[in-house]
Every structure is written in C-alpha cells, then in structure tokens.
Image (cartoon, coloured by chain):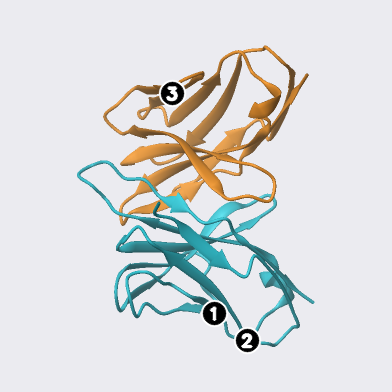
C-alpha cells in the first residue's frame, strides 16, 4: 500500500528565506507526483506536476524535484513571501488514476 | 470558464440522518472523485467514477454511496450520518491526456454531524 509522508508538518520562516518542503513515498511505481497549495477554508490549487520520467519542474519561484528511485520529492520556494503562507500537499498518482496524499506541511511566512 | 462546484459549502446534520453532498463540474471530465480531509490524515479517497453509470469504492467508502447518471454530477450520499463522518469533503475531476494527468478540486463542503 502506498504511503506518502510530508516533513515537516509545520514550518515558520521569516520573509525572504529560501525553503524546502519534503515529500516521501513508499512505492516507487508512480505515474506522476503533484504539489498542491491549500489556503484555510479553501480547496486545493495545483502548483506543479512532475511526470515519473521527469526530474524537476519549475514555475516562477517554485521548483519541484522528483527522485523516483529513492521515493522522494522536494518543493523549493525561493525568496518566500507572506502570501506563500498556506498548507502544501503532495500527492502521487498510482494505477487507476487515483491520488494518494501526504498529510501536508503548514507554512507560515512572517513579514 | 470551466469549473467544479460543491454544495452546500457548510452543513450541520444530526446523527442518523441521510445527507447528500452535490458536486458539479463543467470540464466535461469522465473521471470524478470524492475525498475527505481530516486532521492528521490528509485527503483520503471515498469513491470514484470513470464515467456515467460507473462507480468504485475508495479506501474509506463505508457509510457512503455515489451514483453517476450524467457526466457533470457525482453526488455523495451519507446513508445514516455518524459523528465520525464530520469532516471536510472535496470533489475532484480529471481527464487524462496522454501521460499528463491533473485533478481539479472543488472548494469543499464542511460537514458537521451532531
């Protein structure tokens, strides 16, 4: 059974710092990995999707990497801003088009 | 613009009552999913559908049912609500295109069972 773990569960940083969020998964037989952002009381917004054959994806200040063989992904946020405060979730797609989610990392960026 | 909507956004109900949560998408996606989100568990899959008249159980399907009579809607029914079903419920849809695959999520329904 696929299990997805995100560390740390919560993170507080001052504005301007570069930071890394971690995601690990137990079964490397995945189709892709997706990073989401969730604001309080809101739905999920897709940030980046990495195919299993890819090593990384970039969007603006966000960079996501994938090491399928070791079962790890990282989300790098450059020059963090208070507006980046949210919960970040990673999810892996397995057979049957289903996603398995991690528990999320709650990020607080202080001005 | 295409979107996915859920209603109601908030619901309070009593133990034992039947409750139906609506999900409507205008993406014309074949795949639709229901998840619940609880503290410490992330999102867990309840039921999913790959098309009209197709429904499948996810990892936490006990006490829930779905039906798919058209492409746009996948209502989730709690047959006899229990306090353990207090949660935030998210609906999602997707349409695989080659190897690219992305799920789009609704805004969620917060359900409280008293």
Query: Helix, strand or loop at disc 2?
Result: loop
Could you classify mark 3 by the number of other residues whose Cα lies within 10 Å: few (under 14), some (14-19), or many (20 or more)? few
Identify which residue is drawn at 34% across, 80% down.
Answer: B69
Q: Residue B53 carries which label?
A: none
Label 2, on which residue?
B18
* Palette colour of chain B: cyan
| Left or right of A18 in this view: B16 | right
Identify which residue is drawn at 50% across, 25% down.
Answer: A74
Q: Distance between the residues labelled 1 and 3?
A: 38 Å
Could you classify mark 1 by the number of other residues whose Cα lies within 10 Å: few (under 14), some (14-19), or many (20 or more)? some
Identify which residue is drawn at 59% across, 59% down.
Answer: B108
Label 3, on which residue?
A59
Question: Which sits in the foreground, A61 or B86?
Answer: A61
Asked if the residue under mark 2 is in contact with the one under mark 1, i.e. CB atoms within 8 Å, the reply is: yes
Q: Residue B77 carries which label?
A: 1
Q: Where is residue B62 in the image (x, y as percent from the top left)?
A: 54, 76
Residue most toward the left? B98
Q: Quadrant of the C terminus of chain A?
A: top right
Q: Where is residue A39 in the image (x, y as percent from the top left)?
A: 65, 42
Residue A94 visible, this angle: yes
């Amino acid at each position: 059974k696929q299990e997805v773990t995100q560390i740390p569960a919560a993170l507080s940083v001052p504005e301007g710092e570069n930071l890394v969020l971690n995601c690990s998964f137990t079964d490397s037989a995945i189709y892709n990995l997706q990073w989401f952002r969730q604001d309080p009381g809101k739905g999920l917004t897709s940030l980046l999707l990495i195919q299993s054959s890819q090593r990384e994806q970039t969007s603006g200040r966000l960079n996501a990497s994938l090491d399928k063989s070791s079962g790890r992904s990282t989300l790098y946020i450059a020059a963090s801003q208070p507006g980046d405060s949210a919960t970040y979730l990673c999810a892996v797609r397995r057979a049957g088009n289903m996603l398995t989610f991690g528990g999320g990392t709650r990020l607080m960026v202080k001005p | 613009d295409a979107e996915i909507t859920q209603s109601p956004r908030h619901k309070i109900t009593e133990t034992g009552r039947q409750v139906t949560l609506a999900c409507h998408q205008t993406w014309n996606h074949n795949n639709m999913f229901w998840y619940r989100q609880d503290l410490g568990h992330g999102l867990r899959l309840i039921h999913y559908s790959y098309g009209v008249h197709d429904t499948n159980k996810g990892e936490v399907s006990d006490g829930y049912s779905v039906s798919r009579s058209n492409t746009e809607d996948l209502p989730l029914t709690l047959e006899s609500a229990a306090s353990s079903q207090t949660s935030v419920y998210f609906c999602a849809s997707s349409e695989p295109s080659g190897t690219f695959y992305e799920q789009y999520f609704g805004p969620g329904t917060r359900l409280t069972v008293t």
